[in-house]
Image (spheres, grey):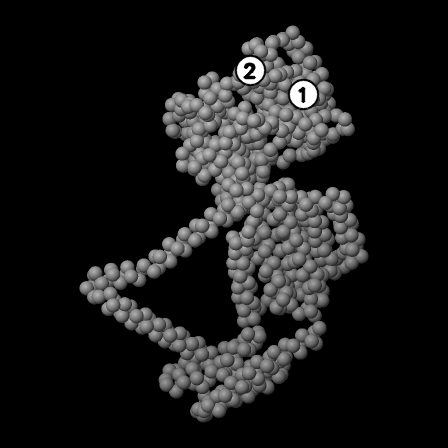
Amino acid sequence: MSDVITCRRHTLWLAMVSLLAFALSQRSLALGLAAVAVAGASWLVTGRCTRRMLHPSVVVVLVTIIAAVVISQVWPRLDPARIPRWIGLGVFFGMQVRLWARRTISDERQVVLLSGVLLVAAGLQSTDLAVGLLIIIGTALAVDCVVRFRLLTPNALARLPHAVWTNVPRRKTQAERDLRRVIIAALVLALLTSAAIFVVLPRNPDPGGPLFGSGRGSRLRFPSDLSLRSPKWIDPDDRELLSVDWHGPDGKPPVVAETLRLRGQVLDRYDPVEFRWFARIGPSQRFIINNGTDRSPLALSPIDERINTHTLHVNFRGLYTDIIFTPWMPISIRGLNSQVFGYSPSSCSIKLVDIETAGVVRGYEARVQPFPSESALTALQGNPQRLPPRPTFPVEAVRATALQWIEEAGLSGLTASPESDERWTRNIRIGQAFEERLRSARFNYSLDLRGFIQREGRDPIDLFLNEYRFGHCEYFASALCALCQSVGVDARIVTGFLVHEYDASDRRYSVREADAHAWVEIRSGNVQWRVLDPTPVADDTSLASDRGVWGHVLRFLLGPLEAAWRERIARFDSVAQEEFVRAFNEWTRRTYRQVRAWPSAIAESLAERTGIPQAGVVWIAAVTLGTASSLSAALLLWRRLQRRRNLLGITRTGRMRAQIGLRDGAFYADALALLAQVGCARPAWQSPRAFAETLQSARPAAAEVFHAIIDRYYMIRFAGRRPDAVRRAHDAALVERLRAALIGGDAHNRSRRG
């Protein structure tokens, strides 16, 4: 019965681990702890009294309600990104109901199956370190439960009430030790198989498909546009996405680090139907071919890099993207390997070309000039022959709001010719007025947009400006850019990261998911642009400064481990797979050459030191190897003799005694070993006859054969009757009869219990 208790207890642990793993994949630690508490309470409350268990009809009703809710959420729109989450939620709550019901071993197997579904759902939605470790632990527990259910649990014990088997005393037997060996072997086999599948199984280089790209905890993909269609609550995460090593013009890291603004996407067009900003594809895009060794310049003409030129090294840790993030203004770039980059002179943005072939960006080195000269900007962007036309914005309600704000700011009389330099002064003054208005107390910063309800016929930017007046940085940047474009001010949205965290010990910036930001650039000259950030200052830095002391401590302790997990495990795509296979092949070839050369090198070294020819050295090595093998065989034989002496109780040495222990009495030692394997080990203090009488009540058929074995053993040991070949065959047959009696007795007991 103790085996049944162990099986049920391990099943409960598996359920707790799977519940916690799925809750963490949904970024809800409180939900996970509550589910674990409910599962633990089911063991304590229902364990002593079956009346406290849920009635089967209640269980059926609750499970039906949960299934109906899941189907209602999944069936109307079969979105592959929603299926794992809702199926996981249904199993999450359904398994908690199941734990409070009366269960047989068949039901316990169902709990194991449901736990496996939860672990798979958690793995599809998250690549976090904590979730990964819980999945590994849950898999090990699942293997343990499957082996125990398969080998040990009788059907009769499975139907006993919980109160009967809670107080059964535990006793370690040889069978239990053998079971543990089987479980360990199964775990090792499962680990090796999983590792082989993980390394060898072909995979898509872009894991951002429908099952992975939209999950809340999946590897992050930096968006190529900015959508305002579905406002929701944003949960900022502290996961590290990038690390940036910054070196000044003197080649040294900064002593006092400033806020780092990394530019990514540049968006200058708005779709009033889809409510999204997107980038205009300019005809002047250039392709930069980099060999991975030298830096490739982005400008067509040389730029003086002797002054005001900084170098940054960027390593990707948890971000899947083809975007190159750099501060203003990049002048050259170098990849980690041979890659082709696309450079847009109009926006000064860089992207990786042909991501399917070259793979995702893993790191790069860029040279930037934060305060570029006009000649450098002209070399990078080109000298426009004529000024671009004034922009417009397709939402008329936003233009009405912009004109009202201009009039209230006293700038209604500010006009300038599109072809004059006064146009840039007008751009700056109007942009700054809009920025000041958005940063005032009339607007509030908030990550919870569940109260931002879309209305038919109203644009989200119009609703933000004139009704709700709350939102996060994307709404503030969208509002400022829309206001500027609606009155002819050249403006564009830039999405990237606003980094505050600088590790002085490692001398690098840590870019986290919570550092994602959006701001606006307005044209202040033919090739100049000025940054305007309408997001309120107090809230703009709150995500980086108000994380708490314990958050910093945990991030410091777990940051390297989390980074290694994401770099080595979560980001193991087709490119990393090819690199691993290439490195493994090189290592095997190198090891094979070293192994082949090792005997020859040793022989040559010994020949030089001793003066013996290489043939003599080989002969000596062969003799040494043969001697070592003989000694090993003799040691194994001696240990076998000692074990049988201890088992047979032979303490005195001698030729006759040794022959009895090693050869003549071997059948008796084999019989004792068989009985120990089925949990009937003979105590050292009990005589063979007394042990046979004890065995009579539990296994009568086996006891009868064992009596015959004892008679034969006593004839050999005490009467001195040495067996001949015929007698030895008869003794071996007695052992086989004992084995058959034990197997037949177990089958008979199982049939009676069933």
Residue bearing mark 2: 386
Seen from the viewer's position, the closer of residues 370 and 710 is 370
The image quadrant where one finds the N terminus is bottom right
x, y percent for residue 430:
61, 14
- Position of residue 551 in the picture relative to residue 122 (left or right): left
- Position of residue 44 in the picture relative to residue 372 (left or right): right
Q: Find residue 228 and name its label.
A: none
Q: Residue 655, relative to residue 346: is it above or below?
A: below
Q: Quadrant of residue 465?
A: top right
Residue under the point 69% across and 24% down: 461
Q: Residue 181, relative to residue 310: is it above or below?
A: below
x, y percent for residue 557:
49, 41
Residue under the point 72% across and 45% down: 78
**Circle 1 — which element?**
loop
Residue under the point 62% across and 62% down: 146
Residue bearing mark 1: 393
**Circle 2 — which element?**
loop
The image quadrant where one finds the C terminus is bottom right
Dot 2 amino acid type:
Arg
- The answer to whether residue 246 is seen in the rendering is no
Residue under the point 57% across and 47% down: 204
- The answer to whether residue 522 is seen in the rendering is yes
